[in-house]
Amino acid sequence: MKIFRLLLVGFICNLIGFSAFTQEMNEGFQFLEKGKFAEAESFFADVLQQYPNNKTAIICYGRAVGLNGRPEKATNLFSDLLEEYPKDLEVQLNYAESLLWNKNYPEARSYYAQLVKNNPENFAALLGYANTFSNLKEYENALTYVNKALVVSPNNPNAMTSKKYIRLGFAYTKMQLQDYEASIQLLSENLEDFPLDKETLLNQANVYLIMEESEKANEVYLLTATNPKDSITALNGMALAAHIGKNDKRALALTKESLQKAEEFGDSELLKKTKERFVQSLIWNRAFKEAENTIENYLSTYGNENWILSLRATLGMYRSDFKDSIEDYKNILEKDSISFDGNLGSANAYFADGQPEKAYEAVNQTLTIFENQKDATNFLDKLNRTYSPDVEERISYTFDNGDNQAYATQTQINFPISLKFTLLGDYTYRKTENTITNNKASSHNANFGVSYQFHPKAKFTALAGVSSASSFSNDYTAVLGKAFFNIKPYKLQDLEIGYQRDIQNFNADLLDRNIAANHLYLNYNLSTNKKIGWFTQYFYTFQSDSNQRNLLFTSVYYNFLTQPVLKGGINYQYISFKDQVPTVYFSPARFNATEIFVDFLKDENVAKEASMFYGLTAATGFQFIEDDKKQSTYRFQGKLGYKFSNRFLLNFYGTHSNIASATAAGFKFTELGIRLKWYLTKKPVFKMN
């Protein structure tokens, strides 16, 4: 932020002293006072041809030269003058100011320090010292000395203007440090001295937006709407506030209003900014086709300007066209290498496209240019968590109406050792018993493995382990294993295909029988930009007791809301076993179930620090077991958690169901549990290349 230019022209004449000149010199003074520095330079050059040794003419010429874009020449002039008048305060003050024109702030600080020490009541020295500190971003010192200047000259307009910009700079620095309350306090103090100051109000609204205080931001924007032009700017800001406040319909209504006013007003730059906000609002409302057509119209009107490319890139991100977005961000950076949208946008696009190395490069470049910028630091934190080791612990208690109960603990560890490789491990202890038969059993399961991201769109995971079981009549060990591919065959599609081997351990009787199940499975999810989705799961299982099972589950759902998530749909499930062994486990020749469901979710990944997250699923329907009459079913699942920090969270969860596929017809099952997740480090443990 470039602020705090010295505002000393208004009292130049007081320093110089009109009495030293004839009445004809007034024209030159007027040039300086009005900022006509080229005319002033020419005027005083002519004067010096007649009076080459006149100190005041040299000073005025030096000021004109310095303020006309040649500060080094001005400093040399004043330096020469100091040799002739080493004790002259007027010359000293002008030399000090010329150091600021040259942006030689460290030397200016030293020189002003001596000036203020020798002249503690000199207004120009105090104000110059204050502005020097502000240029060095030492805002506390700057405020100290501008206040001292105001004691010498109360309500001096130049000092008050400097104080305003010092506070703005100080507030911006506090905002960068994410000390938002301090930033708001400084801006509020500015508004006490400068009521309804537009610059201060817009800065204040921006801080409220970063704080996600959308209502407060909206109130501030309303204060700025004092004329037609500012009303359009206010509407654009209010639209962004509405989006942050999760009211995208209002955002679109506001941008439609501002667009109409901007087209009537006729300011070309303001119209561009308004068109940009309009398209953003269309994207927020998932009106993708209209947004695409509007962007195409803008391209034909304006060409490949960066703000239009940024809109197209944003649309691509929403539609999962990540490679297209990457190309647009590249084109933006070719034209403007320090573009915030281009740098952070490409970081997000690379990450979404499965290219974390480039995502790291892009976000680090963003933070080099925009130090401590909140969106960039948040993205870097998210990226670091993705590749930081974590441990997850679950403790659960289950019971059913068949008098079975079980206690279990499970520990899972993910330990990334590079951007491609992750070491995996889990341990589960489960103790189960039947309170009627007193049959008891327990098992210890341990698995170790690795995950390898061998392509941006494909990952392979393999785990191997062992199960050690001890039951009322049998002790044994068994081999466990799992291997699967996660693939993104096309945008908005996810496919998992694999093999899994486990031991049936739902209750003590099953665990005692040492039944190993081998599953070949497929999970496929298809999302769309129309809010409709389809999930399908298929398992083919062959067991050590020679039985075989086919399981098909499919779900069609509709996303009503995105934040928090609200979706509903229809599920269908089909199960068949080759052999029916109902006294051992639920194994019908045919089983069909249909249900309608609704999910309401605030995901832990989008929850902020020190906030709650939750989830609730409710479903009801019918099940058909072979030729029996239909039976009604229900299912409830819920969780409630708290995110203590971005590295640690805890939640309670529970489920209750009467769906027969768990073990038998007429079955009712309940599980209650607690889950903790802890990211062990703030950053990945491995070094980036």
Image: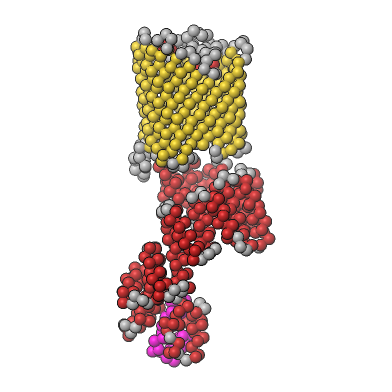
In this view, 524 is above or below 210: above
Q: Which residues are magenta?
A: 42-69
Total marks placed: 0
Q: Position of residue 96 (x, y in %)?
A: 37, 75
Q: Residue 412: x, y in percent? A: 38, 29
Quadrant location, the C terminus: top left
Q: Nearer the viewer, residue 265 or 300?
A: 265
Q: Is residue 47 magenta?
A: yes
Residue 247 in view here: yes
Residue beneath the point at 61% across and 43% down: 286
Residue 370 in sight from this viewpoint: no
Q: Main secondary structure of the magenta part?
A: helix
The residue at 42%/18% (across/down) is 406
User: Can you say whether 110 is above or below 577 in the image?
Assistant: below
Measured as percent of width and height from the top left, residue 333 is found at 49, 54
Scheme of image coloration = secondary structure
Front residue of this view, candidates 174 and 46:
174
* Most foreground residue, 34 or 343: 34
Q: Point out residue 70 in the picture as x, y percentages from the top left corner.
A: 43, 75
Residue at the spot x=59%, y=45% of the render?
247
Residue 375 is covered by the magenta coloring: no
**Residue at x 50%, y 19% (from the top left corner):** 669
Q: Nearer the viewer, residue 477 or 600?
A: 600
In the image, is residue 481 above or below residue 474?
below
